[in-house]
Image: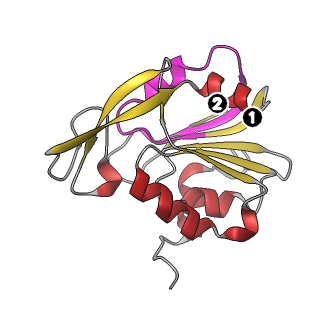
Amino acid sequence: KKPIMLDQSQALEKYTLEGFVNIEPDDTVFDIGAFIGEFSHSAIEQAKQIIAVEPDKTNSVCYWKNIGESYTDSVELVQCVAWKENTKLELNLSSDPTEHALSTPDFGDASNSTTVEARTIDDIAIEYDISVIDFLKIEAEGSELEVLDGIQKISVSKMSIDVSEGNDTKSAK
């Protein structure tokens, strides 16, 4: 049985802006806050490679079910949280899995937490021998600045950062 996903066209439209911030055929894409793979699933149809970062174990299992076996050569999933330094952090688990966060979740009951590995984007990129991230998508539930602080050595060509509680996304080139 195939897991239920959001409309992939909506996921791609949320993070791209036609003629300004697009995913191109040879792009290496970093999907920070990959959740269950809506954005990655859409982006892989256009990109060369996806490096996805998702700290939650259950979301990671759903991610692979949604991506499917046909993309395992071009998709990597790193189970950690992107952060400004390599360390261990407490991830607050919301009753709404879209709201797991290092800070207090916006929605849902956050009575549980788990310790997760935190890594810089630089560290992850170096592990995969990537010197330029062509498209960086960040949805970090309030930790976007700390994620960006973890980029000191790697070049980023295009980025889209979700800084809203709703569907509004800010993109920059």
Label 2 Cα crowd, 10 Å radius (few <14 / some 14-19 / many 20+):
some
Picture mark count: 2
Q: Give the residue furthest to the top.
A: 152
Q: Quadrant of the C terminus?
A: top right
Res 42 seen here: yes
Place of residue 143 in the rendered image (x, y in percent of width and height, measured from the top left): 39, 29
> Is 86 on the left-hand or right-hand side of 172?
left
Q: How is the image coloured?
A: secondary structure
Please tell me whether mark 1 sits on a helix, a strand or a loop.
Answer: loop
> Is 99 on the left-hand or right-hand side of 44?
left
What residue range appears in magenta?
137-163
Q: Name the residue beneath numbered marker 1.
A: 128
Q: Is residue 67 magenta?
A: no
> Is 145 on the left-hand or right-hand side of 101?
right
Q: Name the residue beneath numbered marker 2.
A: 124
At horizontal 30% and vertical 49% (from top left) the residue drawn is 99
Place of residue 47 in the rendered image (x, y in percent of width and height, measured from the top left): 77, 53
Place of residue 21 in the rendered image (x, y in percent of width and height, measured from the top left): 68, 43
At horizontal 52% and vertical 72% (from top left) the residue drawn is 7
At horizontal 17% and vertical 46% (from top left) the residue drawn is 110
Q: What residue type is labelled 1?
A: Tyr
Q: In which quarter of the image is residue 64?
A: bottom right
Res 156 seen here: no
* Residue 3 sits above or below residue 56 on the image: below
* Residue 47 sits above or below residue 51 on the image: below
Place of residue 18 in the rendered image (x, y in percent of width and height, measured from the top left): 69, 52
Numbered circle sitting on residue 154: none
Please tell me whether mark 2 sits on a helix, a strand or a loop.
Answer: helix
The answer to whether the residue labelled 1 contacts the one labelled 2, judged by CB atoms less than 8 Å apart, is yes
Structural distance between the alpha carbons of marks 1 and 2: 7 Å
Label 1 Cα crowd, 10 Å radius (few <14 / some 14-19 / many 20+):
few
Q: In which quarter of the image is residue 117?
A: top left
